[in-house]
Amino acid sequence: MAIREGRLADAAAVTRVGVAAWEKGPGSVLPSSARAPMADGKMFDALLRQTPGRILVADVGGHVLGLAVGDPEGEQLTDLWVDPRAWGRGLGSRLLAAFEQAAGERGRKRIVIDVLEGDERGLGFCRRRGYQAVGRSTVRDRDLHMMIGKIRLEKRLA
């Protein structure tokens, strides 16, 4: 497996992975009406076009099976998606570690991640990797068109 920067040629794979991971992960804790806006994949398709140079992908034998997306400042991980068929194989851990390393190299002192309330799998994943809850918020999500609860997690970088 290689962790590399995402390319426009990865758009279809990023969409496929993002939709599948969303449906099995955080999307599963929301009402079905809220899941519909993500199911068409438009949000994931836009990731590569709107965030060049900010996406890392897990490439396994020429197939994108995971992705990590960060903000322009490199401090917040906005998305971490792994194909559910590859869960438990360490792809998410390697993507997160690569994102943390890149942020550290840019002089960042911490990483911030917002996890959907009720996404116990996502919360557990982050906590097992040293992230601690530092706050909660309720916000109107622009993609889901509804109010959602988020838990903010933070990890200080060495």
Image: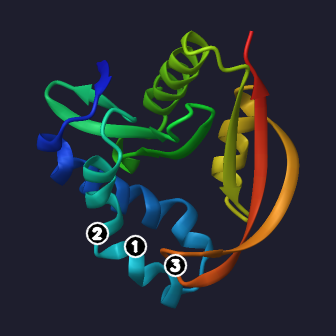
Residue 158: x percent and y percent?
A: 74, 9
- Report the residue that reaches farthest toward the bottom: 33
Q: Amino acid at mark 2?
A: Lys
Q: CA distance from mark 3 to mark 2?
A: 12 Å
Residue 121: x percent and y percent?
A: 64, 50
Look at 35% across and 65% down and name the residue there: 43
Look at 55% across and 31% down and name the residue there: 74
Q: CA distance from mark 3 to mark 1?
A: 7 Å
Look at 41% across and 83% down and name the residue there: 36
Identify the residue position indicated by label 1 in the image.
38
Q: CA distance from mark 2 to mark 1?
A: 7 Å
Identify the residue position indicated by label 3 in the image.
144
Q: Is residue 61 above or below residue 126?
A: above
Q: Amino acid at mark 1?
A: Met
Q: Residues within 10 Å of mark 2 (few under 14, many from 20)?
A: few
Q: Residue 44 appears in which quarter of the rendering?
A: bottom left
Q: Residues within 10 Å of mark 1 (few under 14, many from 20)?
A: some
